[in-house]
Image (tube, rainbow, N blue to C red):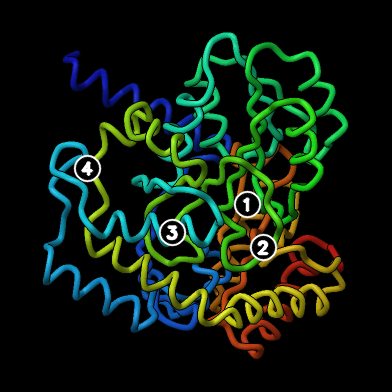
Amino acid sequence: MTSFERLKAFAEQKLSQLEATGQRRSLVETARETGGRAARAGRDVISFCDNDYLSLSHDARVTQAAADAARLYGAGSGGSRLITGNHPLNAALEDRLARLKGTEGARVFGSGFLANLGTIPALVGKGDTIVMDELAHACMHGGARLSGAQVRLFRHNDVAEAARLVKDAAGQVLLLTETVFSMDGDVAPLSELGALAEATGAWLMTDDAHGLGVVKQDNPAQIQMGTLSKAVGGYGGYVCGPAPLMDLLTSRARSFVYTTGLPPPVLAAAIAALDVMEAEPERGAKASRHAALFCELLGLPAPSSVIVPIIIGPEAEAMRVSAALLERGYLVTAIRPPTVPAGTARLRVTFAAGHEEADVRAFAGALKEIMELACAVTL
């Protein structure tokens, strides 16, 4: 058997194992459109599972800014910002983000994932300690492992346990959490964690990927990161904080130093989207009203964000409910382990400014009928 054949056999064996456990993933052609609409595998659907919370990805002002930048500056950046030079749109976007977050500076990365992979190891290393919410995003876990610091997890949103872990931790302590948790839609106790950081000398770093533009929170974190790919509607990530830290990341964050800079059209789109976000706060309010209406219609607790999890449990049941919704014209992809803990497969339902109230009411009715039929569960 040749090396090529052994590689194919290896991949096929792994795929068979994933298939047997129901964890094989596949890509389905889907074209997103305005108003939460999409075309998926030849079917017109309404998406209730994407992260374009303010529906800015199709806003004419945002797409025009991207088009203008492409014509003026080209489609790509040409290389790392440290090699080809720092495009003026990078500085404009970073200044915009720093003002938005009320920090001294900001640094833009290729994605939120890259922002965490680069920033965390630049802050702490061997001999230091990371104390992190157990449900923090995978990229925070990835950055923590890359750092070489000791990683200690506290029960979700349990400030008392976090305090115990911080108290006897070695070296510099980095306290990590999300502001809005991506799979459950609940919020972190930021004021309490901020007080803990101040009392112990720890640094608090938050991931605001799912909070920006939709959930208003006073954030005491010294280091605030997030993405440009959700409420902002484009692509990229950022870190905000003290100006010297931004300069340090320029030299020491490997995912910044060794990555091609974001293309000018992406930068221009993000700047335009942030302008719209600031000028039209009603977009976030509308998305939040949709989430609240959905929960009211289904008798669920009031939501903390525009993310509402419908916990189903068994993976196969979650997949069946998702497929039944698709048949009725609603796209809500089932979320399964290892993304969520075993036994908690779910529908991660998200709401956007582009949805209309009639969409939400019809979707809630369809979900209720399907759940009662497929799972013998009454919502």
The residue at the far top in this view is 127
Image quarter hosting the N terminus = top left
| Residue 229 tag number | 3
State the residue at coordinates (38%, 54%): 94
Q: In the rendered view, would you say 180 is above or below 283?
A: above
| Residue 271 tag number | none
Q: Position of residue 309 (x, y in %)?
A: 71, 58
Is 59 placed left or right of 210 in the picture? left
Mark earlier in primary sequence (1, 3): 1
| Residue 182 tag number | 1
Query: Given this view, does label 1 or label 3 mark the residue nearer the observer?
Result: 3
Task: Work out how far the residue at label 3 is from the one at label 2, CA to CA, in angstroms.
Answer: 16 Å
Q: Position of residue 238 (x, y in %)?
A: 44, 48
Task: Work out how far the residue at label 2 is from the one at label 1, CA to CA, in angstroms.
Answer: 7 Å
State the residue at coordinates (39%, 59%): 28
Residue on which disc 4 sits: 81
Mark earlier in primary sequence (4, 1): 4
- Which corner quadrant of the image does residue 341 belong to? top right
Q: Are marks 4 and 1 in contact (CB under 8 Å)?
A: no
Circle 1 crowding by C-alpha within 10 Å: few under 14, some 14–19, many from 20: many
Q: Are marks 4 and 2 in contact (CB under 8 Å)?
A: no
What's the residue type where badge 4 is placed?
A: Arg
Residue on which disc 2 sits: 307
Mark earlier in primary sequence (4, 2): 4
Q: Position of residue 232 (x, y in %)?
A: 46, 66
What's the residue type where badge 1 is placed?
A: Ser
Query: Element under label 4?
Result: helix
Query: Given this view, does label 3 or label 2 mark the residue nearer the observer?
Result: 3
Q: Are marks 2 and 1 in contact (CB under 8 Å)?
A: yes
Q: In the rendered view, would you say 73 is above or below 281?
A: above
Q: Are marks 1 and 3 in contact (CB under 8 Å)?
A: no
